[in-house]
Amino acid sequence: MSELSPLSGDTTRLLRHLVATIAYRSRLSIRDAPEGYETLRLAEGGMTAVELVNHMTNVLGYVRARITDAERVRQDLCDWEGEVERFYGMLGELDAAFASGVELPPDEDLKLLQGPLVDTCTHIGQLAALRRLAGKPVPGANFIKADIRIGHIGAE
C-alpha cells in the first residue's frame, strides 16, 4: 500500500472550493425546478433528473469513502426531495472531511478530481439541459463573479 501524506493547504482549498462550486451550480438547476422536472430525460434510456442527483450522490460517496477511509455505501433511489437533501448532505460531509484534514496516497487527489469530482460537474450540465427541456432554463450567470464561498454547500 502507498504511503499516505496530508493534502497541502492549497490543495485542500481548491478541493473545498470545487465542492462549493458544485453546490452553487447544482442549486441553479435544482432550486425552483418546474413540475415534472425530476422525471424528464434528455434521451430515451438516459437518466431522469432524480436519477442524476442520486448518481451524483453515489459518485461523491465514492470520494467520501476514499478520503475518510470508510466503506462506500450506495444509496438507493428515493423521491426528488429526498435525493436533493441527500445530495447536499453529501456535499456537506465532503467539505467537512476536507476541512478536517485528509491524508491520501500520492496523486489520489488528482484521480479524485479527474474522475468523480469532474463527473459530477458533467451531470450538473445535464441537469441544466433538463431545465431548458422543461421550459424553465437556468438563468445566465457570470461564474467568475459568482458568490461561491468555501463551506457554503447547502441547497439554499
Image (spheres, rainbow, N blue to C red):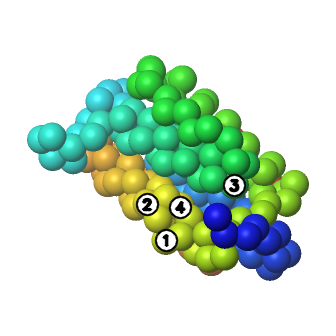
Q: Amino acid at mark 3?
A: Ile
Query: Few, some or many C-alpha atoms within 10 Å of disc 1 (few <14, some 14-19, many ≥20)?
Result: few
Q: Nearer the viewer, mark 1 or mark 2?
A: 1
Asked if marks 1 and 4 touch (Cβ < 8 Å), the reply is yes
Label 1 sits on a secondary structure element that is helix
Q: Quadrant of the N terminus?
A: bottom right
Image point (62%, 76%), residue name: 107
Outermost residue, left side: 44
Going by the image, does 43 lie left or right of 29? Answer: left
**Farthest residue, direction top:** 79
Q: Nearer the viewer, residue 59 or 47?
A: 59
From this viewpoint, is residue 57 visible?
Answer: yes
Residue at horizontal 31%, vertical 47%? Answer: 130
User: Mark 3 — residue?
Assistant: 67
| Mark linked to residue 96 | none
Q: For marks 1 and 4, give the CA distance.
A: 7 Å
Which residue in the structure is indicated by mark 1? 114
Amino acid carrying label 2: it is: Asp
Q: CA distance from mark 4 to mark 3?
A: 13 Å
Q: Amino acid at mark 1?
A: Gln
**Looking at the image, can residue 27 be seen?**
no
Would you name the residue on which mark 4 appears?
117
**Inter-mark Cα distance, 1 to 3:** 15 Å
SS label for mark 3: helix
* Mark 2 closeness class: few <14, some 14–19, many ≥20 residues within 10 Å: some
The alpha-carbon separation of the residues under discs 4 and 2 comes to 5 Å
Does dot 4 land on a helix, a strand or a loop?
helix
Q: Are marks 3 and 2 in contact (CB under 8 Å)?
A: no
The numbered mark, 1 or 3, whose residue comes first in the sequence reads 3
Q: Amino acid at mark 4?
A: Leu
Residue closest to the eye, 125 or 89? 89
The residue that label 2 is drawn on is: 119
